[in-house]
Image (tube, helix red, strand yellow):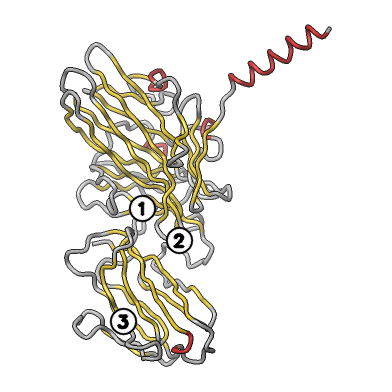
Amino acid sequence: MKKWILVLVIAMITVAAMGQSYLSVEGYGVEAQVDTMDCYFGVGTSAGERLTYDFDDPGSRASSNLVLKIDGQTYGFPTITPSVSFDIRDYRSDGYPRLLTATNTIQSRWEIDSSSHHVILNQFFTPETLDIARGVIRVRYEIENPGTTIVDVALEHKWDIMVGSSDGSTITIPGSFSDTNCVYTTSMPGLFIAPEIGLTDTIDQLVAMGVVNSMDATRPDLLAFGNEIDIIPSVFSIDTSFSGDTYSFSAVLIRWDTDTLSPGATCEIVTYYGLQQNMTGIAEENKLPGDFTLSAYPNPFNSAVTITAPAGAEIEIFDVNGHRVDVIARRATPDAAISPMAEKDCHDLRSRNDGASEFIWQPAPFLGSGVYLVRARFDNRSLSGAEASGSGTITKRIVYLK
C-alpha cells in the first residue's frame, strides 16, 4: 500500500512539474510575468491590475507577443499569428526563460539555427522608474548573428491592451484622440496611452502607457493601434492603408524594420510599457502640508507648459537621468519671493489672485522629446499662510512631445 502511495505522490509531482509556471519581476508599481513553457508574457501592476490581457496568466490567451523575421521567414506564435512561417516556441533555448536576480530581470532566449541562417534572440524584461511614484517595464531585445553569412532581421512586437477590466481601452497619442485604427510611420509620437475609462480627469484613473520614441527607446518604423482583430493576422503587412471602424478589442503593434547583421554582429532594440495616471492633458495637483500645490498644464505638451506653484518655491527641471536641464525660479534666501530667472525670457511669470504664481516653460531647442521632472523645493516659512514647519520637495512628471 505504501508503495502505491509513493508511486502516486511521484506521479503527482511529475504532473505538477510538467505544468506551466510563470516567472515574475516587479518594482515601482509595475510587474512583468513570463510563461516558463512558451515564453508568452504579460504586464500589470504590483497591485494585480492588468495592463495587458495576459497578466496575470500569460498562457491563457497569449495575445501580447513578438514576431521575428529572418531573411523573409517569420518566427512567432501561430496560435495567434497564423501567418508566421515557424513556431518560435520550438526554438526556445534550454534553461530559459530565467530570472536574473542581480538586475531583477526576466530573460527569454531563442536560437534559430537552420541551413540558411543562424540567429539568437534575447528578450529582457526589467522594471524601471520614471519618477519616484510610477514605473515601466523596460523591454530590451538583443539580436545576434553567430553564423557565417549576412542575415536581414526585423522584429514586430504587439501589446494586447487590457487596462484593469477593460479590453476595449481607447488608445491614443497625447494631443490626438482617436478610437479608430491608426498607423504612424514618419511622424512618430513619443508615446501612446490607453485609458481604462476614456480620457477624463479622474484622479485615480489607471492608464497603460508605452514609450516608443523618447528616453533611450529605439524609434520604431511603424506604430499601429486599433482593433486587435485587424492587428493579429497582419504580421509585417500593416502599412499606411491600414484603416477600420471603431474597435472593441484594443491592441498596439510596434515594428522595427530590417537590420542587416554581418557575421558576429548584434543589434539592440528597446521599448517601454507600464503605468501612468492622468495622462489626459488636465492639470494635476499634488498637495503637501502647508497647502503646497504644484501643477502643470497641458501635460503632455508640445511647445510650452504652464507650471503653477505658490510663492516661495524654487523650481527646476530634470531629465529622467537626474540631470538638471533648466532652472525656472530660484530664491535668493528661504524667505525671498518666487521670481523667474532674469536671463531666461521663456520663463514668463504671472501672478494669480489665490497667491499662486504661473510660469510658462518652453524647452530649449536642444532638448528632445521625452519625460522630464519638475521639482519644486520649498520652505514653509516662505509659503503664504503656512506655518514655519520646515522644508520639503515635490516632483511632477511632464511629457514633452516635439
Counting from the top left corner in percent of width and height, residue 377 is at 41, 77
Outermost residue, right direction? 1
Q: What is the C-alpha distance between the residues marked 1 and 3?
A: 31 Å
Q: What is the C-alpha distance between the residues marked 3 and 2?
A: 22 Å
The disc placed on residue 132 is 2
| Residue type at tag 2 | Ile
Between 346 and 61, which is closer to the camera in this rendering?
346
| Residue type at tag 3 | Ala
Is residue 91 depicted above or below 108 in this figure? above
Is residue 50 depicted above or below 264 in this figure? below
Whether residue 283 sits left or right of residue 330 in the image: it is right
Q: Quadrant of residue 237?
A: top left
Q: What is the C-alpha distance between the residues marked 2 and 1?
A: 21 Å
Label 3: state its secondary structure: strand
- Residue found at x 37% / y 50%: 210
Residue under label 1, please give it: 192
- Residue found at x 24% / y 46%: 219
Between 205 and 116, which is closer to the camera in this rendering?
116
Residue under label 3, please give it: 329
Disc with the residue nearer the chain's start (2 vs 1): 2
